[in-house]
Amino acid sequence: HGAGTGVAMDGSVRLEEVVMRFGDFTAIDKTTLDIGSGEFFSFLGPSGCGKTTLLNMISGFLTPSEGQVLIGGEPMAGVPVNQRPTAMIFQNLALFPLMTVSENIEFGLEVRGIDKRSRREASEKLLALVALEGSGPKQISELSGGQKQRVAIARALAVEPRVLLLDEPLSALDLKLRQHMRAELKAIQRKTGITFIYITHDQGEALTMSDRVAVMSAGRIQQVADPETLYRSPATGFVAAFVGENNRLQTTLIERQGERVRLDGGPLGELAGRVAASSPLESGDRAALYIRPEHLRPVDESAAGPVLVATLEAVHFEGAWMVLEARLNASGELLRVQLGHEISRQYADVLVAGRRMLFGYNVEDAVV
Ligand code: ATP
């Protein structure tokens, strides 16, 4: 047993038709999922959707009501928490406040009867990995929030897990530090090759760090994909609304041709968008059309393609871009439009509250 910096063994995780019920409440509906060895995988979803429950089934704190969990291809039924090849980092870190940094990191190794010299060697390597060289003798109380975070990571890695489970570990940090720690976590994951399974309700975290993300809602996985696919091709309305900012327009489907749909745009003509191949929507159905603020642009009357007619209510400067708030004339819904400074300058003389404006978009960017 050395430091946790070597090549990780098979850290794949398979959930096979797992179900978790608490009494007659189903917290996790039948779910099958494969997480690859060495993957940075996140579960993303609102509070109460079942993220912690899934993580607890992997760690062994909970036994599935049905189905099974396999780690490295081995069924985990009956394997207790401390004998699984997993380690966990909690939101509150759970460091031992009266021990030094090294003592914290070496704790798991001491419990396993590893001798002092090997323990010290391991903790030195881990301190280097998390950029805390020389901090071993410090007291936990002397550390900043970010440094404590790194000690927690080093302590979890000391026992050489094949899978590291992280339960919203950054949520207690301030914004700057959180963004910095995202990059650090990602780098540590790459260096160690360990499977990271991360749960968060913060889409920014999930999108920036993960190889793949499972978006969850009410005990079900809505979509599993890499961040870009989630953003560009949300499989469900829930994913479209939850990942990234989106305008949501209520409309009715006029006609569907494969993945293209024509939609009722009110008195101002037709709208268009695309649907997921798996979507059951048909002509006459009510449907929500999702268009991201950055996919809308001002156009004039002669523009080809679908056009939204709106009255400008407000223009906000948001640093890297401008955000327009405009009220759709047809439905009264509020539209947010994000414009780069270049294009804002072009339209400077019409970006005035009360103005009637037309906004166009590419049909591929509008998801139903
Ligand atoms: P959060 O981000 O708030 O932690 P979560 O997505 O992790 O939320 P879970 O903690 O997994 O959600 O909870 C999922 C659902 O299961 C919730 O409705 C919760 O109330 C319920 N639940 C969780 N644990 C238990 C339990 N031991 N007994 C009964 N219900 C439970």
Image: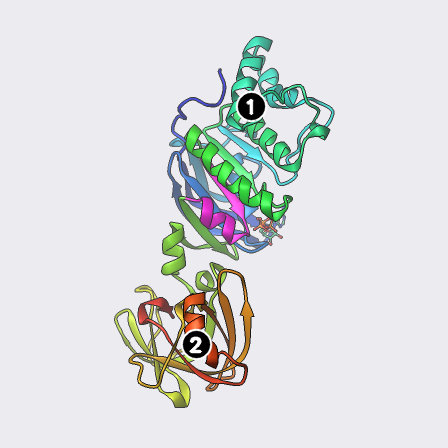
Residue 58: where, in percent of width, then height? 50, 38
Residue 275 in which image quadrant: bottom left
In the rendered image, is residue 64 in sight? no
Q: Nearer the viewer, residue 174 or 343?
A: 343
Q: Are marks 2 and 1 in contact (CB under 8 Å)?
A: no
Residue 365: where, in percent of width, then height? 35, 67
| Amino acid type, callout 2 | Tyr
The answer to which of marks 2 and 1 sits earlier in the sequence is 1
Q: Which residue is mark 1?
A: 127
Left of 52 or right of it: where is 274? Answer: left
Residue 278 in which image quadrant: bottom left
Span colored in magenta: 195-210
| Amino acid type, callout 1 | Leu
Residue 97 on the magenta segment? no
Q: Is mark 2 within 8 Å of ligand 1?
A: no
Residue 272: where, in percent of width, then height? 33, 76
Residue 180: where, in percent of width, then height? 54, 41
Q: Is mark 1 within 8 Å of ligand 1?
A: no
Left of 77 or right of it: where is 136? Answer: right
Q: Is residue 312 above or below residue 189?
A: below
Which quarter of the image is occupied by the C terminus? bottom left
Q: Which residue is mark 2?
A: 347
In the rendered image, is residue 21 in sight? yes
Depth check, mark 2 against mark 1: the one in front is 2
Residue at the left extreme, as displayed? 257
Q: Nearer the viewer, residue 44 or 359?
A: 359
Residue at left offset 51%, top offset 36%: 184
Give neighbour class at mark 2: few <14, some 14-19, many 20+ (Cα, 10 Å): few
